[in-house]
Image (cartoon, helix red, strand yellow):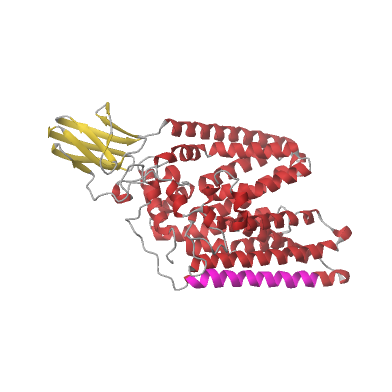
Amino acid sequence: MPVTHDMVMHLNQMQGFYNGLASGRPYPRWQENTNGGFGAPTTLFYPPAIYYLTSLLYLFTGDWLIVIKSLYLLLMIGSGVSMFVLARRFYSHRAALLSMCAYVVMPYHLLNHYQRGAIAECLAFVWIPLTLVFVVDLLCQRARRNGRVLAGITGLALSWGLFVWSHPPTAFQFLLIAGPLLLGVSVASRAWRELVLVGGALLLGLAISAAYLLPAVVEQRYVHAVDVERTWPYHESYVLSTSSPRYDHRSDDFVVRVDRLWLTGFVGLVVLGLSLEVLLRYRRRERLAMDRTFRLWLVMALYASFMMLSASKSLGGLVPGIEIGVFAWRLLAITGLAFALLFGHLAEVFIREGGAPKRARRYFAGVVLAGIGAGLLTVSVTYVVVPMYRAQAFAANPDHSNYSLVPIGASREPPRRPEVTLVDAVGKYSIEKWDPEDRLVHLDLSRPGVVSFRTFNFPGWTALAGARPISINTGSAGEVTLDLAEGTHEVALQFRNTSIRSWGWLLSCFGVLTLSIIFVLGLRLRLAQR
């Protein structure tokens, strides 16, 4: 398995998350084995969904390297299945299979596996098509006729909520691109009721994700969250932007590779779009309902392609919080989706054309389909697979740290310390328990003073001496310190919910309860219609 950009970080975080689950926390937020053991509120801000999956895999395999390999396989299978389900909404079985294959071997899709190691973003590739499946169901008139409205609301809310739990930057960019287009389609077709249903389902999905999303938004002021934007500025990550001082578009192999992926993808989209326009223009009475959709996918892809260029900066600057996307070229996930749908559309035209009068159109469609398919495979192999064929093997690094998640006021490079330090107190101590979010230390002090814990002070940490709460102070490195009197103490240090985290849990519970009611009502309605 080759070394990738993010896998060292993910390995440490998935191990810390599993340790938190093993200690009895249903949603671990504190990662203890980072920043020299001082810890960080990692999954308070980083989406945790992928780590539930890795923890489940580790429970069965007991080997983290096998977990990573199995995870890549499962994510690729999941993305393929969800793409097939979406393509089947428009195309035949065979055309949907070809669309799925195009989506799976899309260069940027493989880039996340082979070079970036962005497993949370890889999980987003599962939710992008699945979210569109339920949007299509709700906007489609047949959903209203066969009583599938409530099922569509349930599916969209759940897939969108899990999308946000998995990778908010991609979810945000997906909404930025698909939102205006779907809004325009709904307004043009006067589908006001359907538009309200889609909007309500999306809001319900946000409610489901509130246990993660609400604290992540509100409490980011307590960490160096702005460091992400400073390190990887969004408005300098445009493709082909040779004037960018942050990204070298001439010598940096990865940046050059992304530029080439954008260029080849754009050419492929233009060829697909023109070919379909030529083929469908002469179908006349043979036109199918699906023929009206290809322009939507083409516009979606071209819009996303434009938003990856520096020419879109003035437009992107009007979008609040666009920096959450971190990289503009992440929109390649959206163009890849649209490309796969257009590829499936062309495949459907090829499959449906038959008979002597249509033979020329069939041959033309077949040639374009084969050419684009071969080009897609060539680009994926050349730009993604081959550069990593003899790459350095992946190796863990237990000392990984992330400054953007270090609490404000804490040391960027914390000192090496034991779990407990008697600063100016005299006595001895023993550690009874040292779980990620729950520590118990027995102290026997012959002289009062300050006791330091190797744990960054952050909202949520509380200290109890017996059953008595004691105030927490902050040490020179940003760690938790306690002023303790002479005598024997049983000190419990616990990471608890703040009020905003509790509100997030309440909103998530409300969302899940509402979703359950809608699901049951929809199930009863469908059974009654049979």
The residue under the point 42% across, 58% down is 7
**Along the line of sight, which residue is nearer the eye, 217 or 455?**
217
- Where does the image place residue 465, in percent across and percent down from the top left? 24, 29
Seen as rendered, the residue at the extreme left is 446
Which residues, given as a range, are shown in magenta?
A: 362-387
Say whether residue 117 is visible.
yes
- Where does the image place residue 511, in percent across and percent down from the top left? 56, 34
Say whether residue 26 is visible.
no
Does 72 sit left or right of 39 as displayed? right
Q: Quadrant of residue 154?
A: top right
Does 381 sit left or right of 468 as displayed? right
Q: Does the magenta stretch include residue 177?
A: no
- Where does the image place residue 394, in percent across and percent down from the top left? 40, 65
**Along the line of sight, which residue is nearer the eye, 229 or 166?**
229
Q: For the C terminus, which image quadrant?
A: top right
Q: For the N terminus, which image quadrant?
A: bottom left
**Along the line of sight, which residue is nearer the eye, 72 or 497?**
497
